[in-house]
Amino acid sequence: MRIAIVAESFLPLMNGVTHSILRVLEHLQERGDEVLVIAPSTQDTGSPGEVYGAHVHRLPSVPLAGYANVRVAMGGVYRVKRILAEYAPDVVHLASPFVLGWRAAQAAHQLGIPAVAIYQTEVPGYAGRYGVPFLENWAWNRVENIHLLAARTLVPSSFALNQLRGRGIPRVEMWRRGVDTQRFSPDKRDAGWRGSVAPAGERIIGYVGGSRSKSRCRTSPCWPMSPAPGW
């Protein structure tokens, strides 16, 4: 197949969206598909022009206010439509679409190319959390417009599934996250370390997160943890 992936963010910026795209590219290369990645430009001159066999087409971009390493692609629908028309993909993969992805959703729709939209970033929710709640309704309108145009929307959790269905978005299905069993394997366990933190064989739970969990751990024991009833 010929697949166009429209990335709201991509290398060298590494985040959840970029990581997901890399795993998709790895899988598509193994399948033997032909892939084009459309992504914002970067100031890093060493950015790869090809990743896992996929050509990377960069669009002019500007830094997001307050986040210099996050780039927002410039231009209108016509620019993306021209790229897609020339490449003629079988399907367009919209990776966490919002700005560039919104243009790509419209371009694909106008060209009659099916698009699959991945909802993994709750952009409208960020508006309230970052002090601009008046933008939340506008952001939801943007999200709804994108996913209404998509032939299918994929979400990583039941929460996201119910959230979008509750807003009237059709054709929403689960695309659960998995675990890389080569990178995260019981073969890598360290018996000495485990004995030092859980000498009585307690169940060990690791957590990587934000400041709320850190503040809790300052006032109450967080490690090691005993298994909860029923675990």
Image: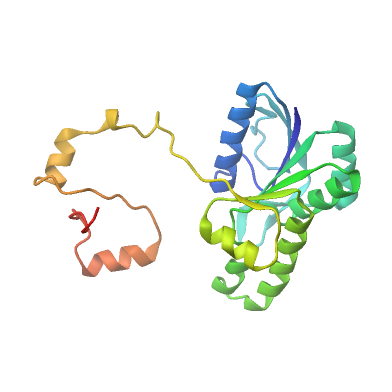
Tell me if 53 is positioned left or right of 75 in this view. left
Tell me if 55 is positioned left or right of 164 in this view. right
The number of numbered discs placed on residues in the rendered structure image is 0
Residue found at x 86% / y 33%: 88
Q: Quadrant of residue 39?
A: top right
Q: Looking at the picture, does residue 123 appear above or below residue 224?
A: below
Residue found at x 67% / y 68%: 167
Colouring scheme, one of rainbow, by chain, secondary structure, one colour: rainbow
Residue 83 drawn at (x, y percent):
86, 38
Q: Looking at the picture, does residue 104 appear above or below residue 64?
A: above
Q: Quadrant of the N terminus?
A: top right
Residue 80 drawn at (x, y percent):
84, 45
Residue found at x 56% / y 34%: 23
Question: Between 15 and 65, which is closer to the camera in this rendering?
Answer: 15
Outermost residue, bottom side: 134
Residue 119 drawn at (x, y percent):
63, 53
Q: Looking at the picture, does residue 202 appear above or below residue 138?
A: above
Specify whether residue 171 is in view.
Answer: yes
Specify whether residue 123 is in view.
Answer: no
Q: Quadrant of residue 11?
A: top right
Q: Quadrant of residue 55?
A: top right
Question: Between 179 and 84, which is closer to the camera in this rendering?
Answer: 179
Residue 26 drawn at (x, y percent):
59, 28
